[in-house]
Image (cartoon, rainbow, N blue to C red):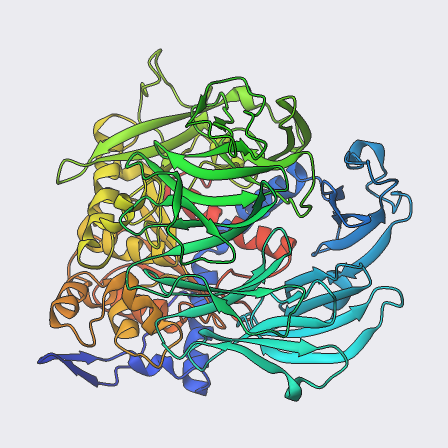
């Protein structure tokens, strides 16, 4: 192999919009099946491998660290549904999980078998049945992803869907769980997320159009050919995507169509799955809502979470028989709280929301009595709904959310909890008593002690005076911090960011990250605008014609960490993926002098070219996020001013840049980072491209492959921080 950088040839390709003429000399790389393109990508991989050959021992060491800290043979916490406990197993040496179930001992048995009570290395759960072994199913495939996994209400059939290319097109099949044999029913090219009707006669699924947009919901009757499947709903508007599912009560099948700013729902009575859908609220531009079914005082009600005149959303109820009735407000709009979801159980509701950048959970008892709790309830007692009771946690930074709760009448609530120092934890909350039972915490082998690590929140000040939160985690004995927690000396630091689609990067634990922390690296997350950490307002102020706030917020966070003594430009690297890869490209153009290296995973760096082409996957849907540069000259000019590929600067002091991508990615096409690297290199930057030839947007499949991929990236980052020795 050679260390000479590949030089992409130049083929002028002219693009003209709104009177602006752009000559793109690397657009020819879009021809995925062209042997010359494949040869160029292969050469890029060879160059990147040669440039990083010296890191092979470090990559192997990091892989071994991840592996040695992971309990390879393990058992998930079983989830009760119907007459069974469902759970997954992992086995040492196997890439994929194994889905299993075991019979429940009795109708009042709500305590799952504890992993400590069974032999995780053997099938020792009494009556265990293996439902799906992905290791067997993946044999002969370089890539394997299990999408749909749904068991019929009576427990006799399994609907499953797999993708063996990475392009997120799945083949749907149905398996007889008594014999283990697949039925003749098979549907190609579906989306993930199919499910049985409660009576088990039908499977509902979705398909995509040529732009990879889920646009049609279908009903398949078991025992009939796919050609006879019935269209339940089709969405012609290219700005909307569709989906379907069962309400938690299993009384209704909900069909939904959503854009980034508008949504609409229809309901089908689950006991009449062939009946026509009936609309809940007709769509109105800019109004989003989601529907949950509850039974309150013996009456069917629809709980609707919406943002009509309530940017941070409010929760209302209407009669299920008349959704057009005047809504009754249950939880009103609060500019300091972003309502995110509601789950209905037979006896209670659970409300998910966020306040001050952290996720929260409240419980409302439908008997009208307040739930047992260790704090104060909020809201008014009205005889039907109890007070909102917040579940409180002690750590300053954490993430809490609903776990698997399939049973309508269950007396407990399954939760997931974790922080930057606390491994992922599964617990059951007992509303009747207020008791919380930890069922399992992610094992971290090798003597992990959370007390050795610290997490904290810092606040940067953006250009316009906005305060931007930063979450940090580090090892106490390797980062010199004073009594006030401020650093006493600059440390090597990785700054991570995303900032799009109202997606929040919440505090979470990572075994792989320990390989950074244990080498003295501080890991920080910049919670920039465009994400959802601080509510809908935070998101709105980082999209469309305010998108540049995302980039300048990240730069402000980097400058804050330098100015406050946490690190220096020579000791800081940056990372982001997908839309966060766009952030990396924009930041590289804005402030390259602040970083020693930038890692961009599946980066959306040729955003304007993609958003101008409605024939590309998901482009029209994306107009609600980025704006429509095809028809709006102001949006075109704004995007033209920041899209990374078109703003690479000759002579800029770019740090070394690594772009990692996948050939079969349908969300961010490989051609974007390929063109970006070619342009960067042409203008003098040290840029490398690493492309997975058998993977999709989420990278390679299989846990060992994923660990090797992450070890490769972490070794590169550590090398840029001067810690590869």
Residue 181: image quadrant is bottom right
Residue at 48% across, 27% down: 387
Count the labels in the image: 0
Image location (x, y in percent) of residue 260 = 34, 61
Return the residue nearer the eye: 278 or 335: 278
Between 503 and 139, the residue placed more toward the observer is 503
Instruction: Tell me what residue is drawn at x 33 percent, y 13 percent.
Output: 484
Residue placed at 48% from the left, 54% from the top?
Answer: 291
Q: Residue furthest left?
A: 19
Judging depth in this view, the residue of 554 and 58 nearest the camera is: 554
- Describe residue 651's horizontal placement relative to residue 382 as left or right: left
Q: Seen in the image, is 516 located left or right of residue 481?
A: right
Residue 442 appears anywhere in the view: no
Q: Residue furthest top?
A: 483
Q: Quadrant of residue 203?
A: bottom right
Where is residue 461? Give x, y as percent.
19, 34
Q: Is residue 120 visible?
A: yes
Residue 551 in the image, given as x and y percentages of width and height: 23, 49
Q: Position of residue 593 (x, y in %)?
A: 20, 45
**Looking at the image, is 196 positioned above or below residue 420?**
below
The residue at the point 31 percent across, 18 percent down is 488
Q: In the picture shown, does residue 79 fall above or below 686?
A: above
Quarter where residue 334 is shown: top left
Side (left or right) of 564 relative to 255: left
Instruction: Report the front residue among 697 and 492.
Output: 697
Apparent side of residue 23 relative to residue 114 in the rendered image (left or right): left
């Amino acid at each position: 192999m050679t260390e000479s950088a590949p030089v992409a040839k130049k083929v002028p390709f002219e693009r003209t919009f709104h009177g602006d003429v752009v000559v793109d000399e690397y657009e020819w790389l879009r021809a995925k099946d062209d042997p010359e393109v494949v040869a160029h990508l292969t050469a890029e991989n060879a160059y990147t491998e040669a440039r990083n050959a010296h890191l092979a021992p470090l990559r192997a060491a990091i892989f071994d660290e991840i592996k040695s800290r992971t309990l390879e043979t393990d058992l998930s916490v079983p989830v009760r549904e119907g007459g069974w406990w469902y759970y997954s197993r992992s086995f040492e040496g196997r890439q994929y999980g194994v889905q299993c179930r075991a019979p429940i001992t009795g109708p009042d048995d709500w305590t799952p078998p504890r992993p400590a009570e069974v032999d995780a290395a053997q099938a020792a759960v009494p009556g265990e049945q293996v439902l799906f072994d992905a290791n067997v199913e993946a044999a002969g495939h370089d890539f394997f992803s299990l999408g749909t996994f749904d068991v019929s209400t009576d427990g006799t059939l399994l609907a499953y869907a797999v993708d063996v290319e990475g392009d997120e097109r799945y083949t749907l099949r149905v398996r007889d769980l008594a014999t283990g044999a697949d039925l003749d029913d098979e549907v190609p090219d579906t989306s993930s997320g199919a499910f049985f009707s409660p009576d088990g006669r039908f499977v509902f699924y979705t398909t995509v159009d040529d732009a990879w947009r889920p646009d049609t919901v279908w009903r398949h009757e078991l025992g009939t050919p796919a050609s006879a499947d019935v269209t339940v709903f089709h969405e012609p508007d290219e700005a909307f995507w569709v989906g379907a599912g069962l309400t938690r009560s299993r009384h209704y099948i909900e069909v939904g169509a959503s854009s980034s700013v508008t949504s609409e729902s229809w309901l089908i009575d689950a006991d009449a799955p062939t009946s026509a859908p009936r609309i809940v609220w007709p769509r109105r531009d800019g109004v989003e809502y989601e529907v949950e079914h509850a039974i309150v005082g013996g009456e069917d009600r629809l709980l609707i979470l919406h943002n009509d005149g309530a940017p941070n959303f409010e929760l209302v109820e209407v009669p299920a028989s008349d959704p057009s009735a005047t809504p009754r407000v249950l939880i009103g709009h609060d500019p300091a709280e972003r309502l995110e979801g509601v789950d209905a159980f037979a006896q209670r509701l659970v409300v998910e929301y966020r306040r001050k950048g952290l996720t929260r959970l409240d419980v409302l008892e439908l008997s009208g009595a307040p739930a047992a709790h260790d704090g104060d309830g909020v809201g008014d007692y009205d005889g039907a709904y109890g007070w909102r009771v917040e579940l409180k946690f002690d750590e300053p930074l954490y993430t809490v959310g609903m776990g698997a709760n399939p049973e309508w009448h269950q007396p407990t609530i399954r939760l997931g909890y974790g922080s930057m120092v606390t491994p992922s934890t599964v617990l059951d909350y007992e509303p009747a008593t207020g008791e919380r039972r930890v069922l399992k915490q992610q094992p971290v082998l090798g003597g992990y002690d959370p007390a050795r690590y610290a997490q904290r929140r810092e606040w940067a000040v953006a250009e316009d005076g906005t305060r931007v939160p930063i979450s940090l985690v580090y090892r106490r004995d390797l980062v010199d911090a004073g009594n006030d927690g401020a650093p006493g000396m600059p440390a090597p630091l990785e700054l991570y960011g995303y900032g799009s689609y109202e997606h929040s990067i919440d505090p979470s634990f990572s075994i792989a990250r320990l390989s950074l922390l244990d080498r003295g690296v501080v890991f920080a997350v910049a919670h920039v605008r465009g994400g959802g950490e601080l509510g809908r307002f935070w998101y709105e102020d980082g999209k469309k014609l305010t998108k540049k706030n995302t980039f300048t917020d990240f730069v402000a966070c980097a400058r804050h960490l330098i100015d406050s003594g946490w690190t220096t430009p020579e000791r800081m690297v940056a990372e982001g993926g997908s839309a966060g890869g766009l952030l990396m490209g924009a930041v590289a153009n804005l402030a390259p002098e602040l970083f020693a290296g930038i890692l961009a995973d599946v980066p959306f760096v040729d955003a304007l070219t993609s958003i101008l082409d409605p024939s590309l996957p998901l482009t029209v849907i994306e107009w609600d996020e980025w704006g429509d540069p095809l028809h709006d000259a102001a949006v075109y000019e704004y995007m033209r001013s920041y899209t990374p590929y078109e703003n690479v600067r000759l002579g800029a002091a770019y740090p070394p840049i690594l772009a990692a991508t996948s050939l079969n990615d349908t969300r961010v096409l490989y051609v974007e980072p390929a063109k970006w690297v070619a342009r960067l290199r042409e203008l003098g930057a040290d840029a490398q491209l690493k492309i997975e030839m058998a993977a999709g947007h989420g990278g390679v499949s299989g846990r060992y492959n994923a660990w090797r991929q992450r070890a490769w990236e972490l070794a590169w980052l550590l090398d840029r921080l001067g810690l590869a020795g």
